Structures are given as C-alpha cells and as structure tokens.
Amino acid sequence: FVNKNHFAGWMLMALPVALGYFLALVSRGMQGRKPGFRNLVLWFSTEHANRAVLTGFAILVMALSLVLTMSRSGITSCAIALVIMGTVTARRQTGASRRALAVGYLVFLAIAVVSWVGLDQIAARFAQMDPTSINERPAIWADTIRIARDFWLTGTGLNTYGVSTLFYQTSIPEFHLREAHSDYLQLAAEGGLLLGIPIVLTILVYALEVRRRFREDDGSIWWIRMGAVIGLLAIAFQSIGEFSLQMPGNAALFAVIAGLAIHDGRRVSNA
C-alpha cells in the first residue's frame, strides 16, 4: 500500500464481508434454538457459536487496524458502513435473541475500537483538516474540474492525469500530482462523457442484477451478499476523496466482492 488511506480502503471492503459472514453464522446457528437465557448460554457451546466468536474476534482486529491508520476517509466510511449494517440487521434478523446478539455485537465493536484508539485522538485527527489550504483536496479537485471542463467529451485519456497536471496543476506546487484524490473526478477528466456514460449504464445494470439476486436468496447467504454490497458502498464513498481502487490489491479485492454481490446464491447449500 502506498499510504494509510489505501490500506483503510482494503479493510473497508473486507470488513463488511466478514461482518456478513458473522451475521450468517448467527442466523444459521440459532435456527431452531429454544427461547430463554439458559438456551442462549448453551448455544455458545455449539460449533456455529465457536465460529461466530472466532469471526467476531477477527472482525474486531480488522476494525481496530482500520481506525489505527487514522485515515479520515477510512474512519468515516467505516462508520457509515456500520450504521448501514446495524440498520439492516435490526430490521432483518428475526427473533429477539438473534437481533439482540447481532446488534449488540456491532455496538460493542464500535465502542471497543473507539475506546482502544481514544476518542480524543480521533477527534484531533479530524480537527487537522483545513479545506481552504492549497494542500487539501478541494484545491486539487478544482484543478481536476478545469481539466474535465476542457476535455468534457473524450477526456485526456486513461492514465494521463499526471501528464495533464503538468499544464493545469496549481495546488501543492512543491509536488507533481499524478492522481486527483477522487476516482470520480479523475475518471471525468481522463474519460469525459465517452467513458462516463458507459460507466453509469454499467452501474445501473449491475445494481439491477444485485437486486434480482437478493430476491432469489433463501437463507444465510443473504447476509454475505449484503456484506459484499455494503463493502462496495463503503469503498465507493471513500473514493470521493481517495484513489484506493488504483492500487492493484484493492482492485483485485473489489472484483472479488463485486462477484460475491451477484453470485447465484441458489448454487450454495445453506440454511
């Protein structure tokens, strides 16, 4: 990874999928469990519970590693992903015990990570942001918008942003920028409408396919698919101000998660 933001981007995609797997284990493992506190305690001795506990610990480590990067875009996107996952879990999980266990873990995850890192440390990191500075994102984006405006139809060509900034860059004068720190603006500058329109159409077709797959799902595979979708949304949000997907490892993981989101769930044996 080139910097902390790109590692955070990788975790933004992997973490929701792991959460989806955790919720699938809870949903599958607690099927048929009799109500009552005693039966809930006994459930923790089962194989499904052991897998859920191990997965939950792994998720805690993953979330902690993300927040420890102090990547503002990563932390913000992670918070949004957890809120979405919590909302979906509260509505989707059936049974008071399942809902309480799943939502309770998400709340514990957020509190544990923030407590470990320190709320004051996180707040101090966000306080350092100055949108008016010539070295911050808005100044870079202003230069990129000028490029996109001049080459609105065909763009400058893929992977030519670093060439165009030789003539357009006014921000961070002591460095030469090869990325716009916004995948959307960089695509607009490099591809114009010639590339932008096919991308938008592809996203629409993909979203319709994901929606169809959700309707076909029956069982715990639904949660893994939801985790994949939330992972895609999280990296999409981070891409507003970062270029994590330009890292080969992140791009590879993105492709895997995109495949999970449209995978035929009927080919997977699950309860």
Image (tube, helix red, strand yellow):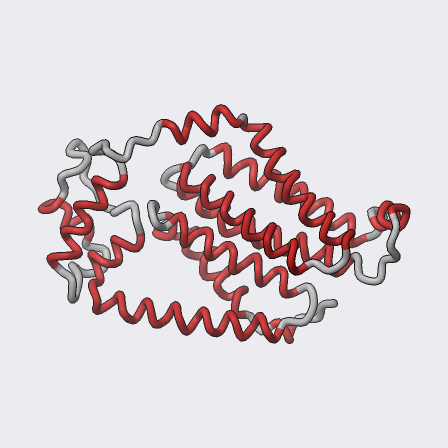
Total numbered circles: 0
Q: Residue furthest right?
A: 38
**Residue lying at 63% horizontally and 71% vertically, measured from the top left:** 217
Q: Is residue 44 left or right of residue 269?
A: right
Q: Position of residue 169 (x, y in %)?
A: 14, 42
Query: Foreground: 196 or 124?
Result: 124
**Residue lying at 15% horizontally and 50% vertically, measured from the top left:** 163
Can you tell which quarter of the image residue 193 is in?
A: bottom left
- Quadrant housing the C terminus: bottom right
User: From the viewer's perspective, is residue 208 above or below residue 110?
Assistant: below
User: From the viewer's perspective, is residue 199 above or below residue 51?
Assistant: below
- Quadrant housing the N terminus: top left
Q: Is residue 242 left or right of residue 86?
A: left
User: From the viewer's perspective, is residue 199 above or below residue 236?
Assistant: below
User: From the viewer's perspective, is residue 271 above or below residue 160?
Assistant: below
**Residue lying at 40% horizontally and 48% vertically, measured from the top left:** 238
Can you tell which quarter of the image residue 129 is in?
A: top left
Q: Position of residue 2 (x, y in %)?
A: 36, 40
Can you tell which quarter of the image residue 93 is in?
A: bottom right
Q: Position of residue 154 (x, y in %)?
A: 16, 66
**Residue lying at 57% horizontally and 41% vertically, measured from the top left:** 62
Q: Position of residue 46 (x, y in %)?
A: 84, 51
Q: Is residue 72 left or right of residue 47?
A: left
